């Protein structure tokens, strides 16, 4: 398994870096669209759609949403989408905290279809808008997500005792969360110092960044909850050793819209 993960990562890394930094116009939006469409197909498994027509219809709906937002600049319309998506995660937080008692509120096919759109379209729009600001800002958010995951993994293995969400993801612990917050706090502090922001802007930037980290944890937990309800371990098998596309972007489904909502409301940094 570890060998598969390493090989897959070595293959994917140059592709990701080229799409982000390659300087070819439109490369990253296309790459992000492909990733989101694969994730949308995997979401149809969580919706428990069986027929090809149903799955293709949902993919077409997501593709039309991507095409619509592709025609928009990062305007107030896209910014409002980021804010709306961020507030929608408050409902997700309640569902995660109360799983499985409130499963009926979100688990129907129609509701899952709507939730999938609210997950995937803001993710694509947020990532593309972030990349349009600067590829380095995109890498910053990715670094926050990776830092939260890495810190949680090592801290949880060494100190993990108290379960974070036992019914959703039994392996995750509060100590792991604290480790992720500690590592990402160091990253945030370093970037804040580099930006040389005044005190008020620095506090705002750090608050948005920490909220983004917490959102990334929620995104991971929400996908785990949806998979557990569907009886699925991995969302897919497209990335050997890593699972599906949805498994790779679950944290970003919350982190990207939350950071971009904060960016838009703050007027950038």
Image (cartoon, grey):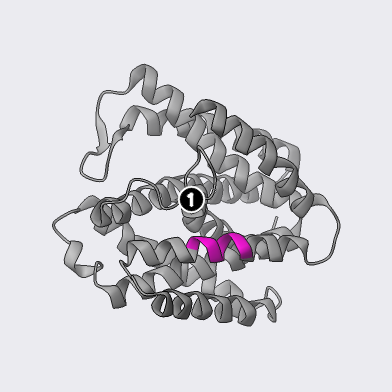
Q: Nearer the viewer, residue 174 or 268?
A: 174
Does the magenta-highlighted stretch encompass residue 269?
A: no
Can the viewer see residue 235 in this picture?
yes
Does the magenta-highlighted stretch encompass residue 35?
A: yes
- Residue 80 against residue 132 in the figure, above or below: below
Q: Position of residue 43 (x, y in %)?
A: 41, 63
Q: Is residue 135 left or right of residue 259?
A: right
Residue at the limit of the structure toward the top, as seen here: 158
Q: Is residue 30 left or right of residue 154?
A: right
- Residue 61 against residue 155 in the figure, above or below: below
The residue lying at 50 percent from left, 37 percent from top is 241
Residue at the limit of the structure toward the left, as seen here: 101
The residue lying at 53 percent from left, 70 percent from top is 121
**Number of marks in picture:** 1
Determine the image quadrant of residue 27: bottom right
The residue pinned by badge 1 equals 244
Magenta segment:
34-39
The residue lying at 51 percent from left, 58 percent from top is 258
């Amino acid at each position: 398994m570890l060998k598969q993960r390493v090989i897959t990562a070595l293959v994917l890394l140059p592709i990701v870096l080229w799409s982000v930094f390659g300087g070819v116009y439109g490369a990253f939006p296309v790459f992000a669209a492909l990733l989101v469409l694969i994730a949308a197909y995997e979401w149809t498994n969580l919706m428990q759609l069986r027929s090809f027509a149903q799955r293709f219809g949902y993919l077409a709906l997501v593709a039309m949403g991507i095409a619509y937002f592709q025609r928009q600049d990062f305007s107030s319309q896209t910014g409002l989408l980021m804010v709306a998506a961020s507030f929608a995660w408050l409902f997700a937080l309640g569902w995660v905290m109360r799983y499985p008692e409130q499963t009926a509120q979100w688990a129907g096919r129609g509701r899952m279809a709507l939730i999938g759109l609210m997950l995937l379209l803001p993710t694509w729009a947020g990532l593309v808008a972030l990349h349009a600001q600067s590829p380095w800002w995109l890498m910053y958010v990715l670094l926050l997500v990776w830092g939260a995951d890495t810190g949680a993994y090592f801290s949880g293995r060494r100190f993990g005792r108290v379960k974070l969400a036992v019914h959703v993801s039994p392996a995750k612990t509060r100590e792991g969360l604290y480790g992720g917050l500690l590592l990402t706090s160091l990253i945030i502090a370093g970037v804040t110092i580099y930006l040389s922001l005044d005190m008020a802007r620095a506090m705002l930037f750090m608050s948005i960044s920490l909220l983004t980290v917490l959102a990334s944890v929620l995104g991971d937990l929400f996908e785990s909850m949806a998979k557990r309800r569907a009886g699925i371990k991995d969302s897919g098998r497209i990335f050997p050793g890593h699972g599906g596309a949805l498994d790779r972007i679950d944290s970003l489904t919350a982190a990207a819209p939350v950071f971009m909502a904060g960016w838009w409301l703050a007027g950038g940094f």
